[in-house]
Amino acid sequence: MDKLAKALAKMPDKDCIKINKVIISIKNKDYSGLDFKKLSGYNDIYRVRWGDWRIIFSLANDDTVILTVEKRSDNTYNF
């Protein structure tokens, strides 16, 4: 099981459903209504903030790769 699937399996069902909708929006490059920001120090890594959750992804070569979905903590951006 990959890291993303593990993260989704651990979160409450209500959050999982909403996070899945956010991930679909990210994959479709529809960032309207999302708290979308480029991470400083990286060329192609971004994050979307949804409540206490962070979805970190890469936009390299017109391809979207979800790197991690984590609850906000001191270690969230250490990937």
Image (tube, helix red, strand yellow):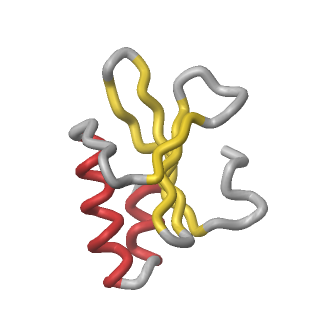
Instruction: Give coordinates of residue 47: x percent, y percent.
Output: 52, 46
Towards the viewer: 34 or 23: 34
Q: Residue extending furthest front? A: 33
Q: Residue extending furthest top? A: 61
- Vertical side of 61 occupied by 9: above or below: below
Quadrant the N terminus occupies: bottom left
- Vertical side of 56 occupied by 44: above or below: above
- Vertical side of 56 occupied by 38: above or below: above
Task: Tell whether 16 sits left or right of 76.
Answer: left
Towards the viewer: 64 or 10: 64
Could you say which quadrant of the image residue 64 lies in?
A: top left
Quadrant the C terminus occupies: top right
Q: Residue at x 32, y 25 (%)?
A: 63
Count all numbered tags in the image, as a single digit: 0
Q: Residue at x 63, y 36 (%)?
A: 39
Q: Residue at x 47, y 45 (%)?
A: 36
Towards the viewer: 34 or 2: 34
Q: Residue at x 31, y 57 (%)?
A: 22
Q: Residue extending furthest right? A: 74
Instruction: Give coordinates of residue 16: x percent, y percent.
Output: 34, 73
Could you say which quadrant of the image residue 17 lies in?
A: bottom left
Task: Tell whether 12 sits left or right of 24.
Answer: right
Instruction: Give coordinates of residue 4: x percent, y percent.
Output: 43, 56
Task: Tell whether 45 sits left or right of 39.
Answer: left
